[in-house]
Amino acid sequence: MKTVLVTWWCGFIGSHMSVLLLQSDYQVIIIDNMSNSSKDVLDGIEKITGKKPIFVQWDIRDKTCLQELFEHYPIDGVIHFAALKAVWESMEKPFVYYENNIVGTLTLLEVMNQYQVYQCVFSSSCTVYGDSDKQPLSENAVKQPCTSPYGRSKSINEDMLLWLCQSTPLRVCSLRYFNPIWAHPSGIIGEYPTGVPANLLPYVIKTLKGTYPYLNIRWNDYPTPDGTAIRDYIHIMDLVQAHLSALERIETQYPWKYEVFNLWTGTGSSVMDIIHIAEQVTWKQLPYQIQPRRPWDVVAAYADPSKAKTVLWWSCRYSVADAIRDMWNFEGMRKE
């Protein structure tokens, strides 16, 4: 049985990843500083899988704690999600984002190298492409100046990983995606962020539930078919399956060192598309208001997933409607 360390400051991607790893007979160690997570999720993981992951409440920026963790457990590989992730927040707190996302990754990589752990799947982002006018994006697209400190932190991490792969035995798959929809089909675990949601879908669900009086749409005069911004939304279970496929590739395939994959459905959905689908799924009307643009908003971001399909033998099984249905089901089952 192989042992995988999952870093999950984002909480909910890591929890779904842990479910899939446990179901695939990996031993799972989770490290989280609990800044935006809940230990209740651990109970959900055990309820779904019948297995309990090892949980450590530490911060990956604490080198001494990481060294103790790697000293105690025979870790074979790392799936690295830990990062602050709200674009708008990164504009307000750039120092916090650079310190968390870059220093945290560097500290983790130093300890991995010290203990000769050379397999890593890195959670990146399509924000590394900037506001590109070439859609759909391919992995060969030039990385442009990012529109937020969050995107810049992901781009810097990618550059750092590439150089370390060239100078050490490290092997990395860097996975770029944008808008995962987070809820397990069981309804037991899913996304429930603290505070006001930073992403569209949690805000949509909470508005439909009545937590908020209306959804804010950030402008409707973009050069898109209905004037609203376009993104590619992916079900969380499709997303974590790609991470598992990437981990298996790192374990078995040589002599490559560093690879990048887009994880997308390949079809973008506008904000209005999401509203219409959510209304059809829930049989509820979603009130909304048009608000001014924000300087970091990107008009459209969706990508070509053909490389992941060909190399990782991965493709999406769930539709956007499936994902919204699972999220609505989770919200209905969640205890206040």
Image (cartoon, helix red, strand yellow):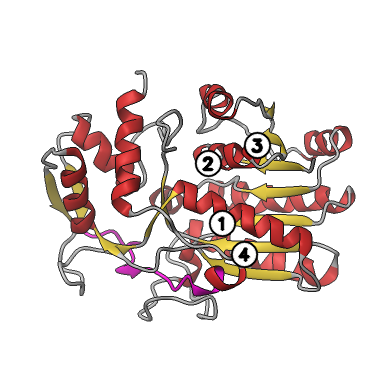
**Image coordinates for residue 201, horizontal then vertical, percent:** 31, 45
Left or right: 42 as drawn, with respect to 192:
right
Distance from disc 4 to disc 2, alpha carbons, whole Å, reads 19 Å
Residue where numbered disc 2 is placed = 10
Name the kind of residue labelled 2 in the image. Answer: Cys
Would you say the magenta stretch is mainly helix, strand or loop? loop
Which of label 4 and label 1 is nearer to you?
Answer: 1
Residue in view at x 39 percent, y 72 percent:
131
Magenta highlight on residue 201: no
Residue in view at x 46 percent, y 51 percent:
90
**Image coordinates for residue 76, horizontal then vertical, percent:** 81, 47
Q: Earlier in the sequence, mark 4 or mark 3?
A: 3
Residue where numbered disc 1 is placed = 242
| Viewer can see residue 93 | no
Name the kind of residue labelled 3 in the image. Answer: Leu
For label 2, the crowd category at 10 Å Cα-Cα, with few meaning under 14, some 14 to 19 and many 20 or more, is: many
Mark 2 residue element: loop
Name the kind of residue labelled 1 in the image. Answer: Ala
Residue 281 is tagged as none
Which of label 1 and label 2 is nearer to you?
Answer: 1
Distance from disc 4 to disc 1, alpha carbons, whole Å, reads 23 Å
Mark 3 residue element: helix
Which of label 4 and label 3 is nearer to you?
Answer: 3
The magenta span reads: 292-308
Asked if the residue at tag 2 contacts the one at tag 4, i.e. Cβ–Cβ closer than 8 Å, the answer is no
Residue in view at x 41 percent, y 39 percent:
183
Distance from disc 1 to disc 2, alpha carbons, whole Å, reads 18 Å
Q: Quadrant of the N terminus?
A: top right
Which of label 2 and label 3 is nearer to you?
Answer: 3
Q: Earlier in the sequence, mark 4 or mark 2?
A: 2
